[in-house]
């Protein structure tokens, strides 16, 4: 290898440039490739570990779907300047909710975004000009979206929780038949809404759970010539994933 080290003196057959022997070039190239692969592997593992650690420290994200039953209270309804007792039928529907329980709050306090829809029907004595003409009837479609503040027990197989919610609701009359009123095929009223809730999760594994929940929901609907205080009990059964 002495001739390869003379380099710039000009006495080397390679002249002023340095050309290592082929076996040395192969050794240097292979070593560089190994170092590059090792460095990239270490960087990738570091990023993966960092992502897992950040997710673990961020908190729990929960996605749930559920079926619900509605058992409304029979209250009075205001119809064309007359207040009469109303009957509201039970209904069934479904919903989705997404919740976040931050690690900074020990996963005990969280915020949920919840949306659901269910059917029903209402009927009441239709009184105009002091006379009972017939029974006013209409199908009812209710859709709700609320933000729920939830306090829960953060560990164990069974995790009870309570909460309150605030949002908005939409009550739609479908095919109403109410004498003395200019009925359309549907009539929609939007209103603020709030609710109180309580329930429990049952963990099947760290990522999957079942839950049952009770809610008491309140909203007030005002249609054309017709208004109603809507109060209902909700019962929910569903399943969810935790990320």
Image: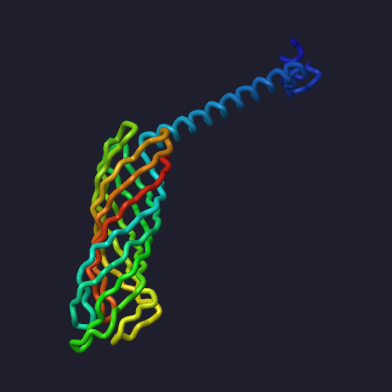
Residue 125 is drawn in which quadrant? bottom left
Q: Is residue 226 above or below residue 212?
A: below
Q: Nearer the viewer, residue 65 or 86?
A: 86
Q: Quadrant of the N terminus?
A: top right
Q: Is residue 18 above or below residue 230?
A: above
Residue at the image point whose x is 30% and y is 78% from the top: 136
Residue 181 is drawn in which quadrant? bottom left
Residue at the image point whose x is 23% and y is 66% from the top: 74
Q: Position of residue 14 (x, y in %)?
A: 79, 21
Q: Is residue 182 visible?
A: yes
Q: Position of residue 111 (x, y in %)?
A: 30, 48
Residue at the image point whose x is 35% and y is 69% from the top: 140
Q: Nearer the viewer, residue 1 or 55?
A: 55
Q: Is residue 59 visible?
A: no
Q: Nearer the viewer, residue 101 or 140?
A: 140
How many tags in the picture?
0
Residue at the image point whose x is 68% and y is 20% from the top: 28
Q: Is residue 236 above or below residue 221?
A: above
Q: Residue furthest bottom?
A: 129
Q: Position of residue 152 (x, y in %)?
A: 27, 40
């Amino acid at each position: 290898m002495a001739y390869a080290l003379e380099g710039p003196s000009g006495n080397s057959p390679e002249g002023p440039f340095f050309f290592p022997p082929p076996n040395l070039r192969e050794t240097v190239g292979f070593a560089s490739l190994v170092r590059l692969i090792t460095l990239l592997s270490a960087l990738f593992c570091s990023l993966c570990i960092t992502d897992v650690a950040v997710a673990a420290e961020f908190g729990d994200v929960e996605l749930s779907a559920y079926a619900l039953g509605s058992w409304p209270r029979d209250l009075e309804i205001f119809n064309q300047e007359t207040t009469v007792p109303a009957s509201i039928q039970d209904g069934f529907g479904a919903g989705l909710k997404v919740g976040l329980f931050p690690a900074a709050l020990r996963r005990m306090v969280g915020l949920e975004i919840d949306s659901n829809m269910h059917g029903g029907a209402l009927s009441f004595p239709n009184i105009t000009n002091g006379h009972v003409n017939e029974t006013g009837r209409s199908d009812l479609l209710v859709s709700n979206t609320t933000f729920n503040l939830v306090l829960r027990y953060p560990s164990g197989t069974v995790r009870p929780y309570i909460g309150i919610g605030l949002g908005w609701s939409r009550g739609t009359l479908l095919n109403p038949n109410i004498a003395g009123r200019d009925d359309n095929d549907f009539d929609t009223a939007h209103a603020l809404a709030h609710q109180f809730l309580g329930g429990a999760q049952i963990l099947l594994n760290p990522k999957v759970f079942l839950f049952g929940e009770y809610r008491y929901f309140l909203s007030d609907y005002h249609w054309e010539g017709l208004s109603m205080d809507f109060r209902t009990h909700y019962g929910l059964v569903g399943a969810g994933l935790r990320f």
